[in-house]
Amino acid sequence: DAGVTQSPTHLIKTRGQHVTLRCSPISGHKSVSWYQQVLGQGPQFIFQYYEKEERGRGNFPDRFSARQFPNYSSELNVNALLLGDSALYLCASSLARDRDSPLHFGNGTRLTVT
Amino acid sequence: LAKTTQPISMDSYEGQEVNITCSHNNIATNDYITWYQQFPSQGPRFIIQGYKTKVTNEVASLFIPADRKSSTLSLPRVSLSDTAVYYCLVGAGNTGGFKTIFGAGTRLFVKA
């Protein structure tokens, strides 16, 4: 079975631009979460979506938005990029939305903002 | 919010057993304890999950005392490829409206 896939794997953007990151969950997984990981730190929660609805949001500005499609894939959008948005963006899927359902992560999108 | 505390780093040698202890004093009655492993430039990988006593799978064992205020991940006979960051989470990291926190993790370095 294919794992969680994310695209692109690497991306370089200029400050002020917009970016869209994509995620395909494991087949059968209805929950998708997004995390930001800065070098040397643990992943920081951005969003969770379940059945196409936002179920949780972390402490990120409104420049960050996401959505989940009928096939459960998801997009993370970031507007007005700042240098501090440079990070590894991770997508994780899980079978259920409850707190103890293990997360399955993709290998992330490395975003560099110059 | 349940917070976890674990050592920042640990060193070991190949073939040794490694035990990483995590403190979670504020764990709630219905919380599970979950450990993830992360290699550089990869997403975290689920290792093991438990609620109480001992859980074992093909990769690791998880020991949880009766008061559940701490847990210990045990990696038997580590190899160089076990060099990674290990995260202890209360809950599985699947927030469902909660804000489960990934800490900085424990950086395990296995030497030859």
Image (tube, rainbow, N blue to C red):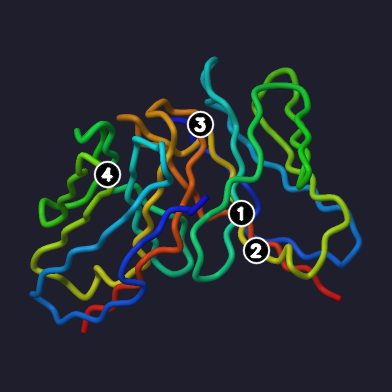
Point out the residue furthest to the top here.
B29
What is the C-alpha distance between the residues marked 1 and 4?
21 Å
**Residue under circle 4?**
A47
- Element carrying mark 4: strand
Of the numbered discs 2 and 1, the one sitting upstream in the chain is: 1
Q: Are marks 2 and 1 in contact (CB under 8 Å)?
A: yes
Q: How many labels does the image show?
A: 4
Residue drawn at x 66%, y 23% as measured from the top left = B68
Residue drawn at x 63%, y 37% as measured from the top left = B23
Q: Residue B91 carries which label?
A: 3
Position of B53 relative to A24 (above/below): above
* Marks 3/1 same chain: yes
- Element carrying mark 1: strand
Residue A91, image x, y percentages: 37, 53
Of the numbered discs 3 and 1, the one sitting upstream in the chain is: 1
**Residue under circle 1?**
B37
A17 to the left or right of A32:
left
Residue drawn at x 32%, y 66% as measured from the top left = A7
Query: Which kind of residue does numbered mark 2 sit on?
Result: Ala
Q: Are marks 4 and 3 in contact (CB under 8 Å)?
A: no
* Marks 3/2 same chain: yes
Query: Which kind of residue does numbered mark 1 sit on?
Result: Gln
Query: Which kind of residue does numbered mark 4 sit on?
Result: Phe
Residue B80, image x, y percentages: 78, 70
What is the C-alpha distance between the residues marked 2 and 1?
6 Å
Residue B44, image x, y percentages: 53, 55
Position of A3 relative to B3 (above/below): below
The chain that hosts pointer 1 is B
Q: Do the residues labelled 3 and 2 touch (CB within 8 Å)?
A: no
- Element carrying mark 3: loop
Residue drawn at x 28%, y 48% as measured from the top left = A73
**Residue under circle 2?**
B84
